[in-house]
Image (tube, grey):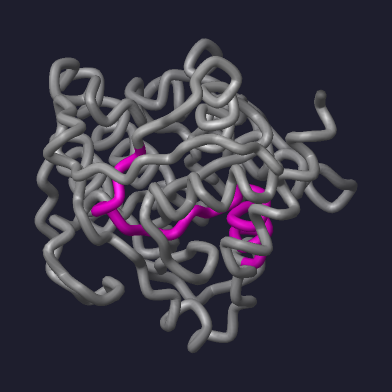
Amino acid sequence: MKIWITGYKGMLGHDLVKTLNNDEYDLILTDKNKVDITNFNDIEELVKEHRINIIINAAAYTDVDGSQTNKKIAYNINAMGPKNLAIISKEYDIKLIHISTDYVFNGDKNKPYTEEDETNPINYYGETKLQGEKFIKENVSKYFIIRTQWLYGVNGGNFVKTMLKLAESNNEINVVNDQFGCPTFTKYLAIAIKELITSEKYGLYNVTNSGECSWFDFAKLIFETASVHIDLNPVLTSQYPTIAKRPKYSVLSNKKWMDEGFTPLRSFKDSLNEYMELELNKY
């Protein structure tokens, strides 16, 4: 079985390669320098050459603040790229697995979002990701759209690494305490995606580690796990302005994922403990 992974050098892409790299699968790995998913001819050429069975689209423009100013780039990668992949998947009977985000919601709900909840993004990044979802639904039927959130992993930068780095040169750190989500270890997201390779239960799914917390709660847990003593100050989003608005509560319900018989992901606390062992062993 030939699986094409776009964005394989990214945080999730790295763990997808690690999870799927065995004799059972023939992995075709590309990044933006090898294949431009916004160029349909590039995509079709690769698909025809390798006779792809499954596409896992882990490519995205994930700079939330940057998306507000680099709108054309964000739209092309997050919306037009998935559209091209959907069209080619329909044409060549390919299963498409696409990664989306909790940022398709406005964050005004006070309980976890389901797949049926109304979308209403409050930043341009969320708008482009939602448009990408719509293009996929309009152009192909054999698709999985995975909404996830607050990703961290061993490859590349993430919130955990940022906190540990800040602690090296600061006695105190301010962290937002009124934005809530669920930190998700890309290792377990990759394992979840692997289940979809042999599944035909197509559609839209929320897939995250279980539980919820604020960024402040998460930072506190990071430092406790790492035995780092630092003064953490909870602050409001209004005290920490950013170019793009963030949803205040965007926890995703995994009920549909479990109801369909897929394996539930570990709690975010257990996953963080495992990740921290890997991270701290680097030093």
Position above or below: 42 against 226: above
Q: How many marks?
A: 0
Q: Is residue 271 left or right of residue 236?
A: right
Tell me if residue 145 can be seen.
no
Query: What residue sits 35% from the left and 67% below the top?
Result: 252
Query: What residue sits 52% from the left and 70% below the top?
Result: 210
Region of the chain picked out in magenta, as a range: 175-195
- Pick the front one: 162 or 232: 232
Q: Is residue 11 left or right of residue 106?
A: right
Residue 34: x percent and y percent?
55, 14
Residue 212: x percent and y percent?
42, 66
- Pick the front one: 50 or 68: 68
Quadrant of the rendered structure where residue 168 is? Answer: top right
Residue 99: x percent and y percent?
43, 49
Query: What residue sits 68% from the left and 63% below the top?
Result: 270
Residue 251: x percent and y percent?
33, 65
Q: Is residue 113 left or right of residue 57?
A: left
Query: What residue sits 19% from the left and 51% below the top?
Result: 247
Tell me if residue 148 can be seen.
yes
